[in-house]
Every structure is written in structure tokens, then in C-alpha cells.
Image: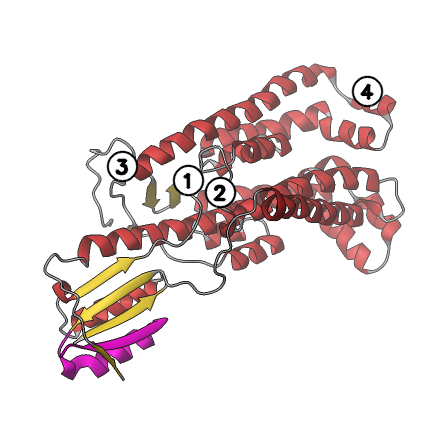
């Protein structure tokens, strides 16, 4: 059940509250979105709520990067072992990695610039949109959430902040992939060894190629949950203000002059 | 009699209004004025406004990722290993990004001072009988009104 039946009469809408999550247009910095696509192809698109192409690029990155050994080459390069970096790269895969990687950055950059314009137009048009969704499996509505809470949960486990914000699809995707990265990189084993002070064993147990995916996905999900909490709050305020203006500014209301009493 | 009050934009405001209507105050006798708080206009190619916390940390998060990946890679040949170095890299990147951003905001693009803390975001005025004033005042306070004042006209 929804509180607004869209008849598709608006030219543009700025948000949609659905069972699977709140999707909204808002202003974004194209350089920051482009940066996230550089950190991990697909992240820029996920921030833009262009989930399907985000997923495609993300999975592409995991598969092709591991096949071409790009992460391993990065590790060797940062360590200054350029010869070993050249050695490890698989040229059977490498050349198709590059164009898609660059496409991800370029496409998310130009989409951001475009969508910022669409947002401004949608905001000026200020058409009504659905703000409440009640179904057999889920309930979603606009409300105010704490950005700090969302960040803290995501620090503990990527994806929890997305659940807090009711972004079910992103949450599921991030949780599944984080578990894969945590498992394949053996990072949790290494962490428990570090707690025991076995630093050397901890380094040895790690799988470097898989480990390198973790900082990106973890910090990305923290950033994503923060952004969506803040923007959801703004959307809530905006909707409430519109509601007040529509319903509680009756023409017959007269403000009286008088004295303040206790 | 009219009762003036200010609120933040929260769900409590709507709860207060719906309770007032349930207690017999007509819609026409409730007047709400959403206030615009002082902030710079949003610009299309600029970042989000700084007060929302995002633009303040966006560079920090980006640099944290970059430094974390680089330091973790180098950490494989350092004595502390990749996890400690990855975390150190993330912290350095975050602090560096935040410092750059704060420098830009405080020094390069200095803006007029803004109020911190609780902001009045909505003015709510209720027209009612003097007999109901007590009840309404209590409802407003219970729903986290920032300030309430009763005005009697003579």
C-alpha cells in the first residue's frame, strides 16, 4: 500500500519510497563520484542509485582484476618491485581491464553532472511522490536517522548502515561481497593473530590479492551509509515542510496582537 | 487566544499536530511556518553544503581508501604487516583529507558564522479558546517544542 498513486504526470520526480528502499536524486560532487569509481569500478554508480550497472562493473572488477592479477601488481608496484609487477600481470586479461575501468570513472562522472541538473529541475518542479510503502514483506517510510549511528554500524560490518537506511538491495550486495572478501583474504584470522601479538604469522596468513579489495568496500560502505542517512533526513524535512505548507496555512487564519501571558 | 511555538523538523511535530486535531482543534486554526535557515545557496558544480557533514568528510574518505590500499601493500614487507599499516594509512588519509577540507572551508571559502546546536525550523501558531490553553501548551512541550508563548488579545 502506498500513500500516493503516481499518474506519471510530472516531468521529473526527485524521490521514490518503495518497499526495497528510498531512492532519491540529490546533488553530488562529480569528482568524488568519479573517485569512488576509480577506487572500485561500480561504487560511483551505486552512490548514484544506478544499481544494475554498479553491480555489473563491480563483479567485472572482481573477476577481471583477479584473473589479470592487477591487485598483486599494485602491491608489487607500491613496494617498488616493478619487475615483479610486470611479471605477475596476465596479458591475456589485462587489456580488457583497462577500458572498462576508465569507462566506469568517466560514465559515473558525466552521469553525476547530468543527474545534478535533473535534480535541480525536479526540485523546482516539486511534484508529489510516494513517501510511504507498506507491503507483506517490508515497510518503508521517510524518517529521521542519526548519521553517526549509521557510520558506527557500518564500521562494525559493511552493509549494516545500508540496512539501517532501508536500502535492502545495496545492503544485501555489500554484505555478500564483504563476507567473500573477509573469507578469501583470511583477514579475520590475521586480526585474531594480531590480538595475540603474532604479527609475522598474521602477515603470512593473508591473501594479498583479496585483502586489497577490503579497504575500498569498507570505507565505501561507511561513506555511502553516511550520505544516504543525511540525504534521507533532508528528504524527510523537505516532505514535512511541503505537508505543513499544503495543510496548515489556511487563508482565514489571522494572527492577533496582544500581550504574552504566563 | 493564540499559542506560538517553535519546533525542529521532526516526526514529533506532526504527532503534536495530529494530537491537537484529535483534541478538537480545527485545521484552519493551526498555522505552520517552515523557516528557512541561513545557508548558502547550493551550486550545481559545488559540493554539498558543508553543514550536512558529507562534504566535510568526502575527501577524507577518498584519501583514507587510497592511503589504506597503498600502505597495506607496502605493509607486506614491513615488520608491522599489512593490517596495521592499512589501518594507519586509512587514519593518515582521513586526517589529511579532513585537514585539507577544513583549510578550504575556514580559510579559502570563509562563510558568515552560522548558529550551532538546536535550530528553530518551524513556527507553529494555534488559535484556541483560553480554556484549552493549558492542554495545548502541555501537548506542545511533550512533543519537544523549543519554545512556547501564549498571547491574549485585549
Of labels 1 and 2, the one closer to you: 2
* Helix, strand or loop status at disc 2: loop
Q: Name the residue under label 1.
A: A26
User: Can you give x and y, in whole percent of width and height, for residue A28 in the image?
Assistant: 48, 37
**Is residue B138 positioned above or below B113 on the image?**
below
Q: Give the range drawn in magenta.
A: B128-154
Which quarter of the image is occupied by the C terminus of chain A? bottom left
- Separation (CA) of disc 1 from disc 2: 9 Å
Of labels 3 and 4, the one closer to you: 3
Chain at tag 1: A
Name which of mark 1 and mark 3 comes first in the sequence.
1
**Is residue B80 positioned above or below A94 on the image?**
below
User: Can you give x and y, in whole percent of width and height, for residue A2 in the image?
Assistant: 24, 49
Assess whether residue A49 is covered by the magenta stretch. Answer: no
Q: Name the residue under label 3.
A: A125
User: Which residue is pictured at 20% across the width and 70% down the height?
Assistant: B126
- Separation (CA) of disc 4 from disc 1: 42 Å
Label 2 near label 4: C-beta < 8 Å? no
Amino acid at each position: 500500500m502506498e500513500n500516493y498513486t503516481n499518474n506519471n504526470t510530472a516531468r521529473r520526480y526527485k524521490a521514490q519510497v518503495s518497499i526495497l528502499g528510498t531512492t532519491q536524486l540529490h546533488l553530488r560532487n562529480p569528482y568524488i563520484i568519479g573517485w569512488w569509481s576509480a577506487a572500485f569500478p561500480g561504487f560511483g554508480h551505486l552512490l548514484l542509485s544506478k544499481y544494475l550497472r554498479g553491480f555489473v562493473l563491480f563483479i567485472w572488477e572482481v573477476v577481471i582484476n583477479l584473473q589479470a592479477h592487477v591487485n598483486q601488481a599494485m602491491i608489487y608496484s607500491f613496494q617498488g618491485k616493478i619487475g615483479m609487477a610486470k611479471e605477475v600481470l596476465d596479458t591475456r586479461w589485462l587489456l580488457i581491464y583497462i577500458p572498462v575501468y576508465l569507462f566506469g570513472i568517466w560514465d559515473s562522472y558525466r552521469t553525476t553532472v547530468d543527474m545534478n541538473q535533473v535534480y535541480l529541475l525536479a526540485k523546482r518542479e516539486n511534484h508529489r511522490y510516494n513517501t510511504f510503502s507498506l507491503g507483506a514483506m517490508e515497510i518503508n517510510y521517510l524518517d529521521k536517522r542519526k548519521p553517526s549511528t549509521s557510520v558506527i554500524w557500518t564500521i562494525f560490518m559493511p552493509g549494516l548502515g545500508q540496512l539501517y537506511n532501508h536500502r535492502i538491495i545495496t545492503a544485501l550486495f555489500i554484505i555478500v561481497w564483504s563476507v567473500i572478501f573477509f573469507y578469501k583474504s583470511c583477514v579475520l584470522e590475521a586480526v585474531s593473530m594480531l590480538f595475540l601479538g603474532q604479527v609475522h604469522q598474521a602477515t603470512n596468513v593473508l591473501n594479498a590479492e583479496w585483502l586489497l579489495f577490503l579497504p575500498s568496500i569498507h570505507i565505501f560502505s561507511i561513506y555511502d551509509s553516511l550520505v544516504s542517512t543525511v540525504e534521507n533526513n533532508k528528504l524527510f524535512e523537505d516532505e514535512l515542510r511541503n505537508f505543513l505548507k499544503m495543510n496548515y496555512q489556511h487563508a482565514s487564519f489571522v494572527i492577533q496582537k496582544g500581550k504574552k501571558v504566563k | 487566544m493564540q499559542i506560538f511555538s517553535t519546533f525542529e523538523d521532526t516526526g514529533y511535530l506532526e504527532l503534536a499536530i495530529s494530537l491537537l486535531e484529535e483534541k478538537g482543534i480545527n485545521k484552519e486554526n493551526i498555522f505552520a511556518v517552515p523557516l528557512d535557515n541561513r545557508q548558502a545557496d547550493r551550486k550545481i558544480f559545488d559540493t554539498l553544503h558543508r553543514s550536512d557533514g558529507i562534504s566535510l568528510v568526502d575527501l577524507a574518505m577518498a584519501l583514507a581508501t587510497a592511503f589504506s590500499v597503498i600502505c597495506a601493500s607496502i605493509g607486506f614487507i614491513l615488520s608491522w604487516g599489512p593490517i596495521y599499516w592499512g589501518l594507519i594509512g586509512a587514519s593518515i588519509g582521513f586526517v589529511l583529507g579532513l585537514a585539507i577540507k577544513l583549510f578550504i572551508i575556514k580559510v579559502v571559502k570563509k562563510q558568515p558564522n552560522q548558529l550551532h546546536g538546536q535550530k528553530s525550523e518551524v513556527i507553529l501558531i494555534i488559535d484556541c479558546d483560553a480554556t484549552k490553553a493549558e492542554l495545548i501548551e502541555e501537548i506542545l512541550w511533550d512533543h519537544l517544542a523549543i519554545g512556547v508563548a501564549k498571547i491574549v488579545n485585549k
